[in-house]
């Protein structure tokens, strides 16, 4: 997932949604070239949040700059697994590497924070990075009222964070319905 492979010109969308994707694309590209503060992408599944977040990390990798891409539910699973006697990674080692990454992407943030333990761990990462003002990108499909309020207050701090809602619909759902329509049209024209 790169900036070159991101379809921000989706001509099949209404103008408002295309302009919104264009702005999201340029916010991500600007952040990748000079990561400062936080960039939070909010929106429905499939709208492009993860693609843009991964493009930021890949851009940094191409520039030989360190970055870490974490899928939040997987991160929480890995943290839980460090408590196992067979774990090759210690809890402290994993947790500290995520907290202190020079640039961190937390992908798919939100729905998994239903347990007090998960809320506490994620808050510790968010709060540490907030206080240290470490560059962070977060993607979420949760609305503001679904996020834990101490975490939401960090996301909404306009001094540090840019919160941007992508309003484009699911990219893949549109492609699948277009394929189904063209297949239906093909069947009708053949028969």
Image (tube, helix red, strand yellow):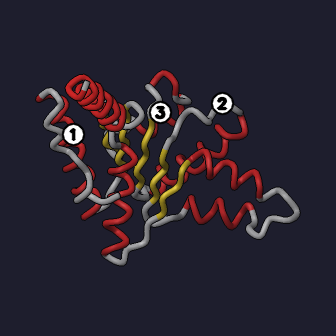
* Residue 167 appears in view: no
- Residue closest to the eye, 186 or 45: 186
Q: Is residue 157 left or right of residue 80?
A: left
At mark 3, the secondary structure is: helix
Residue under label 1, please give it: 21
Residue under label 2, please give it: 114
Q: Residue furthest bottom?
A: 64
Task: Please state, as top left, top right, bottom left or bottom right, where the N terminus lies in the image.
Answer: bottom left
Task: Say which of marks 2 and 3 sits in front.
Answer: 2
Question: Can you say whether 80 is above or below 153 in the image?
Answer: below
The x and y percentages for residue 3 are 25, 57
Task: Say which of marks 2 and 1 sits in front.
Answer: 1
Density class for disc 1 (Cα within 10 Å; few <14, some 14-19, many ≥20) is: many
Pointers 2 and 3 in contact (C-beta within 8 Å): no
The x and y percentages for residue 188 are 24, 23
- Residue closest to the eye, 1 or 185: 185
> At x 34% / y 68%, what residue is drawn?
60
Residue under label 3, please give it: 152
Task: Please state, as top left, top right, bottom left or bottom right, where the C terminus lies in the image.
Answer: top left
CA gap between label 2 and label 3 equals: 15 Å
> At x 77% / y 59%, what residue is drawn?
82
> At x 74% / y 61%, what residue is drawn?
91
Density class for disc 3 (Cα within 10 Å; few <14, some 14-19, many ≥20) is: some
The x and y percentages for residue 124 are 61, 48
Choose the circle earlier in sequence order: 2 or 3: 2
At mark 1, the secondary structure is: helix
Q: Is residue 31 left or right of residue 87?
A: left
CA gap between label 1 and label 3 equals: 23 Å
* Residue 158 appears in view: yes
């Amino acid at each position: 997932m790169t900036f070159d492979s991101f379809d921000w010109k989706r001509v099949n969308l209404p103008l408002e949604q295309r302009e919104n994707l264009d702005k999201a694309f340029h916010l991500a590209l600007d952040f990748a070239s000079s990561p400062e503060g936080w960039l939070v992408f909010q929106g429905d599944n499939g709208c492009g949040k993860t693609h843009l977040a991964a493009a930021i990390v890949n851009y940094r990798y191409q520039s030989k700059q360190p970055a870490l891409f974490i899928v939040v539910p997987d991160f929480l699973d890995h943290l839980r697994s460090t408590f196992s006697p067979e774990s090759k990674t210690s809890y402290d080692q994993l947790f500290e590497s995520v907290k202190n990454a020079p640039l961190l992407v937390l992908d798919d943030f939100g729905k998994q924070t239903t347990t007090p333990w998960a809320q506490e761990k994620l808050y510790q990462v968010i709060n540490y990075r907030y206080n240290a003002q470490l560059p962070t990108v977060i993607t979420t499909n949760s609305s503001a009222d679904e996020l834990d309020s101490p975490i939401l207050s960090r996301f909404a701090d306009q001094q540090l964070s840019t919160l941007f809602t992508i309003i484009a619909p699911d990219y893949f759902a549109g492609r699948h319905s277009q394929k189904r329509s063209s297949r239906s049209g093909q069947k009708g024209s053949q028969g």
